[in-house]
Amino acid sequence: MNALEANGRSAAMLRHVLLVLASLVVLFPFAWIAAAAFKTQISLLLGQVWFQPVLLNFDAVLSGRSSDYLRNFTNSLVVGLISTALVLVVATLAAYSLNRMRWPRWVGHSMLGWSVLFHMVPPITLAGAWYSMFRPIGLDNSYLGLILAHTTLNLPMALWMMSVFVNDVPEELLEAARIDGARTPRILWSVIVPLVAPGLAAAGVLSFIFSWNEFAVALTLTQRETATVPVGIGKYAQENTIAYTEMAAASMLSIVPAVVLLLVAQRFIVRGLTNGAVK
């Protein structure tokens, strides 16, 4: 073995060690929450590493008389699914308009640039304004108000991703459809949508996960009847006591939909983010 090979192996080993350490740093909070979900409150506060796992916390979260978790879960599901559907429809139509219709170039650049700027605005800075607008017309503490807010928050990201995919559709296919007599709605449904399906899957999964995890706007616009999962988890911390173990159990249950979606659509998400990065 020469010195060059030895240095190469040492560098590879160092990279593996760093990757393992980085993985441990990332996974430790999840492991701590998972362990806390199966502990009793006393066991957690005593800091016991070895403990007898219990399911009391999951039972309290799912069937406790004072628990609203199932209602919170249903609220998050309704808001996430409907806002994601709206985001995909609006983003696809906007991407088609910006890329395939005869707009001046500065219009498309301005819209996409504004989308990037809006996407960087912290949602909490918009929550107060939305509350002031929605309350007089009765949209506070309603599904519709939160759906509109989440659609607005996630639309810029979806518009960017769908612009990349729509721009990749060959113009020759659209011309052939027009020659066959197809109008714009028919072209969108029969040509554009099948070709940009991976982009729709990626943008849809990300929009749903962002809506599922959003906390600040939901906390401002909802009350007990319409509170979502993040808001419900936050309410386990009261003024005089914090139910750490029940909070951990609720957190474990809340990550299930996001993990399932990520596993199902992982390759679409990677492709969507990669296409957006290289354009």
Image (tube, helix red, strand yellow):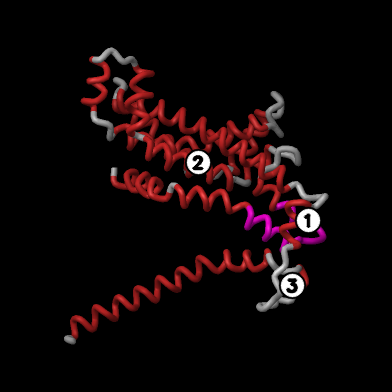
Residue 238's label in the rendered image is: 1
Q: Is 210 placed left or right of 76 in the picture?
A: left
Label 2 sits on what residue type? Answer: Ser
Q: Secondary structure at mark 3?
A: helix
Specify which label sits upstream in the sequence, 1 or 2.
2
| Placement of the C terminus among the 4 image quadrants | top left
Nearest the eye: 179 or 215: 179
- Counting from the top left corner in percent of width and height, residue 146 is at 63, 35
Q: Secondary structure at mark 2?
A: helix
Label 3 sits on what residue type? Answer: Leu
Start-end of magenta stretch: 234-253
- Counting from the top left corner in percent of width and height, residue 163 is at 35, 34
As drawn, 61 above or below 118 = below
- Counting from the top left corner in percent of width and height, residue 132 is at 67, 31
Specify which label sits upstream in the sequence, 3 or 2.
3
Nearest the eye: 65 or 127: 65
As drawn, 75 above or below 91 = below
- Residue position marked by numbered label 2 in the rendering: 207
Nearest the eye: 157 or 78: 78
- Who's the residue at 46% across and 28% down the image? 90
- Who's the residue at 52% across and 66% down the image? 27
Label 1 sits on what residue type? Answer: Gln
Closer mark to the observer between disc 1 and disc 2: 2
Residue 45's label in the rendered image is: 3
- Counting from the top left corner in percent of width and height, residue 87 is at 49, 33
> Can you tell which quarter of the image residue 212 is in?
top right
- Who's the residue at 51% across and 42% down the image? 121
- Who's the residue at 76% across and 41% down the image? 224
Q: Residues within 10 Å of mark 1 (few under 14, many from 20)?
A: few
> Can you tell which quarter of the image residue 102 is in?
top left
